């Protein structure tokens, strides 16, 4: 079907449309309104929570395992400074972080000892109480938006049809082929581009069903009000300091996902990709042409 508009979601092609299968260059419907609304609300919320979380971390830039921290003071992660530069310590490893983490230079040239610099935090100058207000207010948005999106995505079949791995997709050969395609930056074209590939599904699944729920559960355990009511949650998570460490690691995992996610969007064609997440409409990338035979070259039968 040339230049037509079709309403199709990844991997959910109704039989009736088979007669006019869209091809590269066609404009098709890609993301539902509920997915698009959640995606951008979540992106904003995660950014604000991350930046305010870094300010909360600045109040005590050390992480521990177990129930208690500070006494004895044996953090597994610490951001500080020594010898005129910042230092990130993870176990026995000490990394020189220059003037980025642990120590920064103010515009007037003076040195400022802080784990994360002001340009990474909300608010930009030290305030634990303001950071907590931002963090808790947007935690409510994060939870409400995720619940609404997940319920909607179960009802409209998005999780089953588009996000769930098919049995064959777990096969090592299938996953390896997908890894090679990514490494060669060969993205699917035509109708195949409508489906999420297995690595994409694994990454989205890790965010939606592991990292976000775990960051919410550990955050709930850390909140003093909830700690008093749901103390069993702190115990299940291995103690208050373990909950704080897991909370921080999940946030770091989300930052890692974000970096790869943005790189993939940029490589796959940022205008088409981002437009599809804003308007829902996506232009199928044109199919690759088969290489023309060289003069005199035989064409295999
Ligand atoms: C400026 C930042 C971001 C941009 C430009 C962006 C862009 C996109 C685009 C274009 C897609 C669709 C990919 C496709 O159709 O193949 C997508 C999907 C997705 N993004 Fe993002 N994204 C951003 C931030 C985030 C953040 C912060 C998260 C989570 C922490 C996130 C999680 C997801 C998930 C889970 C999906 C799949 C949604 C679904 O199909 O239900 N994104 N993103």
Image: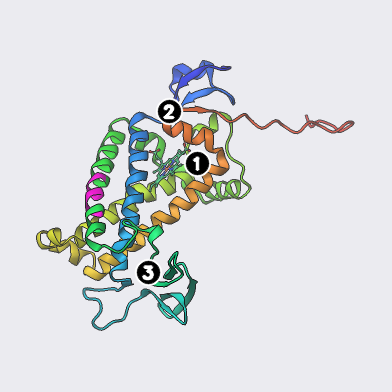
Whether residues under marks 1 and 2 lie with C-beta atoms below 8 angstroms apart, the answer is no
**From the viewer's perspective, is 86 left or right of 63?**
right
The image shows residue 45 at horizontal and vertical percentages of: 32, 46
Q: Which residues are magenta?
A: 135-141
**From the viewer's perspective, is 297 left or right of 88?**
right
Comparing marks 3 and 1, which lies closer to the viewer? 3
User: Would you name the residue on which mark 2 appears?
Assistant: 279
Dot 3: within a 10 Å radius of its alpha carbon, few (fewer than 14), some, or many (20 or more) residues? Answer: many
User: Would you name the residue on which mark 1 appears?
Assistant: 197
Q: CA distance from mark 3 to mark 2?
A: 40 Å
User: Would you name the residue on which mark 3 appears?
Assistant: 115
Q: Earlier in the sequence, mark 3 or mark 2?
A: 3
Image quarter for residue 23?
top right
The image shows residue 274 at horizontal and vertical percentages of: 47, 36
Residue at image location 62% in from the left, 29% down from the top: 286
Give 204 or 128, whichever is nearer the viewer.
128
**From the viewer's perspective, is 270 left or right of 146?**
right
Q: Earlier in the sequence, mark 3 or mark 1?
A: 3
Residue 59 lies, with reference to residue 91, above or below; the image says: above
Residue 95 lies, with reference to residue 46, above or below; the image says: below
| Placement of the C terminus among the 4 image quadrants | top right
Residue at image location 49% in from the left, 18% down from the top: 5
């Amino acid at each position: 079907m040339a230049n037509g508009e079709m309403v199709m979601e990844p991997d959910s092609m109704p039989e009736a449309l088979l007669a006019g299968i869209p091809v590269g260059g066609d404009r098709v419907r890609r993301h539902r309104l509920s997915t698009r609304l959640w995606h951008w609300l979540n992106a904003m919320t995660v950014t604000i929570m991350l930046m305010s979380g870094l300010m909360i971390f600045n109040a005590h830039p050390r992480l521990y395992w177990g129930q208690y921290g500070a006494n004895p003071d044996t953090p597994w992660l610490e951001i500080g400074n020594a010898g005129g530069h910042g230092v990130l310590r993870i176990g026995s490893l000490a990394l020189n972080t220059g003037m980025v983490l642990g120590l920064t230079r103010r515009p007037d040239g003076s040195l400022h000892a802080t784990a994360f610099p002001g340009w990474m935090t909300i608010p930009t100058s030290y305030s634990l109480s303001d950071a907590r207000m931002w963090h808790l207010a947007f935690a409510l948005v994060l939870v409400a938006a995720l619940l609404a999106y997940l319920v909607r995505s179960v009802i409209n079949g998005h999780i089953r049809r588009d996000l769930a791995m098919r049995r064959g997709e777990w096969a090592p050969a299938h996953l390896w082929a997908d890894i090679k395609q990514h490494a060669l930056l060969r993205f699917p074209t035509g109708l195949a581009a409508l489906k999420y590939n297995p690595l994409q599904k694994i990454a989205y699944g890790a965010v939606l069903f592991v990292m976000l729920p775990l960051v919410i559960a550990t955050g709930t355990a850390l909140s003093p009000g909830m700690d008093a009511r749901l103390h069993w949650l702190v115990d299940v998570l291995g103690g208050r300091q373990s909950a704080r460490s897991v909370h921080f690691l999940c946030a770091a995992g989300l930052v890692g996902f974000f970096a790869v996610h943005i790189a993939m969007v940029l490589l796959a064609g940022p205008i088409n990709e981002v437009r599809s997440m804003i308007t829902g409409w996506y232009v199928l990338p044109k199919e690759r042409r088969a290489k023309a035979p060289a003069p005199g070259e035989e064409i295999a039968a």
